Image (cartoon, rainbow, N blue to C red):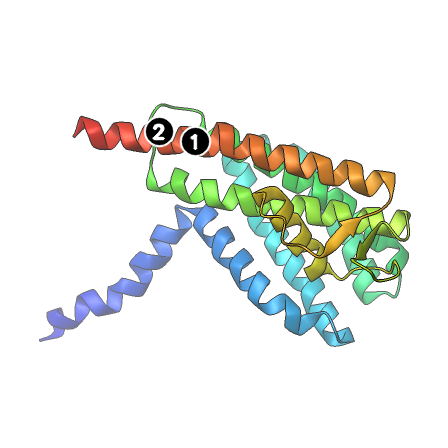
């Protein structure tokens, strides 16, 4: 009788062990949860503090992913000052430091994207982890441009505006929505870039989204189809 309970007792441990071997899966889950929870955080001081803490947790997961795919010292060189600046901005009343934190986070996310793409293109077979990494890489790319947009609007006020609305600072969720809609080519965002720097970043986002699908995603799909045909 005791043995019949063993599989159910061991199941959570097996799941945790399996997820530990696939950090990209954990990162993707946390980022999706972040998309669902960010709207509840950005309108209150306590919510923004929680958002800052959650951003640091996501950064830790990014470091975990990067350590597997790239040179880890570069990631730490970007992450440590970013976390310090974010803590000072969110908990020490120094909001002017936040754009610098976001700029460093943006660079770190781009670095993580490069590492994951190199990981996915490193061999001629497609594993489940590489399929998840393809989705995770896209979300990292979206986060990277959203942080770049955030730093841009802090340094160049009026960089982004809602259609037919006077320029004003956009929320994080609005900038993330702009990033996703630009990278995906859907173009559903009602936020438009106004300053030259904002438009340059947006054009880079468009180019990155198209090239990511053309190079990384298409290759993963082609290798998956090839594997199915060889069975």
Is 183 positioned to the left or the right of 98 in the image?
A: left
Which residue is at 45% across, 26% downward? 121
Which residue is at 80% across, 66% downward? 91
Which residue is at 78% across, 36% downward? 200
Q: Nearer the viewer, residue 165 or 66?
A: 165
Is 151 situated above or below 200?
below
Query: CA–CA distance between discs 1 and 2?
Result: 6 Å
> Helix, strand, or loop for circle 2?
helix
Is 182 positioned to the left or the right of 100 in the image?
A: left
Residue reaching furthest to the front: 164
Q: Position of residue 132 (x, y in %)?
A: 42, 45
Q: Position of residue 14 (x, y in %)?
A: 29, 57
> Helix, strand, or loop for circle 1?
helix
Which residue is at 54% across, 38% downward? 67
Residue reaching furthest to the left: 1
* Rendered image quadrant of residue 40: bottom right
For the C terminus, the quadrant is top left
Q: Are marks 1 and 2 in contact (CB under 8 Å)?
A: yes
Is 21 situated above or below 176?
above
Tag of residue 218: 1
Is 63 positioned to the left or the right of 100 in the image?
A: left
Can residue 81 be seen from the camera position used here?
A: no
Can residue 4 be seen from the camera position used here?
A: yes
For the N terminus, the quadrant is bottom left
Give the residue at mark 2.
222
> Label 1 crowding class (10 Å Cα cut-off): few <14, some 14-19, many 20+?
few
Q: Position of residue 105 (x, y in %)?
A: 71, 46
Q: Nearer the viewer, residue 9 or 225?
A: 225
Tag of residue 98: none
């Amino acid at each position: 009788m005791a043995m019949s309970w063993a599989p159910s007792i061991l199941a959570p441990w097996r799941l945790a062990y399996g997820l530990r071997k696939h950090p990209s899966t954990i990162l993707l889950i946390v980022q999706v949860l972040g998309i669902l929870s960010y709207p509840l955080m950005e309108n209150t001081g306590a919510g923004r503090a929680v958002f800052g803490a959650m951003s640091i947790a996501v950064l830790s997961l990014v470091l975990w992913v990067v350590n597997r795919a790239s040179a880890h010292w570069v990631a730490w060189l970007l992450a440590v000052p970013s976390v310090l600046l974010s803590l000072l901005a969110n908990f020490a009343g120094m909001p002017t430091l936040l754009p610098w934190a976001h700029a460093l986070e943006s660079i770190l996310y781009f670095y993580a994207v490069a590492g994951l793409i190199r990981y996915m293109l490193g061999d001629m077979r497609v594993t489940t982890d590489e399929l998840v990494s393809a989705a995770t890489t896209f979300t990292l790319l979206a986060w990277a441009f959203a942080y770049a947009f955030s730093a841009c609007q802090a340094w160049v006020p009026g960089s982004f505006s809602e259609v037919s609305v006077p320029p004003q600072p956009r929320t994080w969720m609005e900038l993330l929505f702009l990033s996703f809609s630009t990278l995906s080519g859907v173009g559903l965002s009602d936020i438009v870039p106004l300053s030259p720097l904002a438009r340059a970043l947006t054009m880079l986002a468009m180019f990155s989204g198209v090239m990511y699908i053309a190079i990384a995603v298409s290759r993963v799909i082609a290798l998956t189809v090839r594997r199915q045909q060889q069975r």
